Amino acid sequence: MGMLDGVRILDLSRLLPGPACASWLRGQGAVVDRVEAPGRGDFTRHIPPYVPVEGGEVGAYFAATSRGVRSVAVDLRHADGIALVRRLAPRYDVLLEGFRPGVLEAMGLGPDVLHAEAPGLVIARLSGYGQTGPWASRVGHDVNYLGLSGALSAQAEGPRGLALPTVQVADMAGALVAAAGICAALAERARTGRGRVLDVSLAEAALWVASPLLAGATGEGVDPGPGEHLLSGGLPVYGTFRCADGRWLTLGALEPKFQQALVARLDGDLGVLDHPVLAARLATQPRDHWVEALQEVCAGPALAPSEVADHPQHAARGAAVRQGAITWVRPPLGELPDGGVPALGAHTDVVLGEAGVDAGPLRAAGAVA
């Protein structure tokens, strides 16, 4: 049994942060019903790269966050669609939304309205900058939130500007902050019977990730440049090194005992532990030779995405699983959800039927699909 078995989530969110939060909750056993717009559905269904699923192809961002989720196609621009969500909401423990501040209220689905009918409902609101403050109404994406965290300015400059992380740091951090908040709110509700409104800012999630950097930089009075922070290139024995086969080794010999062990493992002839000397030595053998030889020195491979599911650590714990051509990641602490990636609106009739709602008239009116 999952830790959240019996918990029901109504997910009105879109793009990555909200669905990633819902995906983690689904992995702990919660039922997740996602409301998508009829016609095209969530925008991430159409963002490349695409992965093959039953019935065709779908965007990787959608696929990665939608296994085992039930898709309900409801038009929230239609009065009957809004009325339907209002009717459904009391049947759930959590309502998750990712609209810009004020949109939920404009639809007549604000927290005051929902709590009047369902006092125990936990309402998790994910937005770029939070529900308050001078930037609350501004639009944004991961790059903007990282920019506000203070971390992006120290990235190395490439041909197209500052190098960006390959993954969406603020979005995924915000998803986990929301998931943690939801679990805490459910624990509180078990004591008090009352729900709670969670104001989750993606910018603040990125800020939390950057908190050690900010404390150190402001404490020293120095804003680090590219490669100058201790753990981003400032320490020669903490970084990445290209090996003889062209693949990359990660090295994290932070503590003196690991640095001493590193010198011993490399025949003790290194002299000063600087990056050029280490780079030259580690370039003499293939990556996996060093992964084995330096296993007591905080070394490991910088895996390519195609290698991840085959790594023995991930395979032993079922953390990453290859099914067909696709690598799926198990939500940490939970299970990889069954049920595959849903087609748009595949569960509309099922979900409405569970609520005693006849989908026929709503479909005829264009409110559901």
Image (cartoon, rainbow, N blue to C red):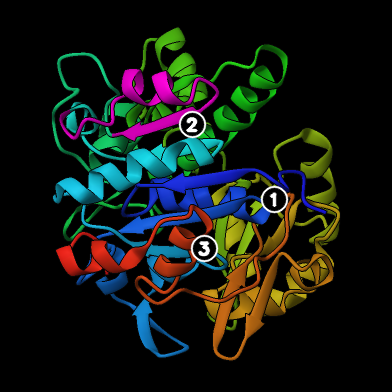
Residue 125 lies within the magenta run: yes
Q: Position of residue 249 (x, y in %)?
A: 62, 65
Query: Picture coordinates of residue 60 (x, y %)?
Result: 40, 72
Which class describes the residues within 10 Å of circle 2: few (<14), some (14-19), or many (20+)? some
Give me the residue at 42% from left, 74% from top: 346
At 58% from the left and 45% from the top, the residue drawn is 8
Total numbered labels placed on residues in the image: 3
* Numbered disc 3: secondary structure: loop
Observer-nearest residue: 134 or 341? 341
Q: Please tell me whether residue 30 is drawn above or below residue 107 in the rendered image.
A: below
Q: Amino acid at mark 3?
A: Val
Look at the image and give the residue range highlighted in magenta. 106-127
What residue does disc 2 label?
209
- Label 3 to label 1: alpha-carbon separation: 13 Å
Please say whether residue 89 is visible from this viewpoint.
Answer: yes
In the picture, which quadrant includes the C terminus? bottom left
In the drawing, what numbered circle is on residue 45? none
The quadrant in which the N terminus is found is bottom right
| Residue underneath mark 3 | 69
Q: Secondary structure at mark 1?
A: loop
- Tell me the tag on residue 28: 1
Q: Nearer the viewer, residue 256 or 18?
A: 18
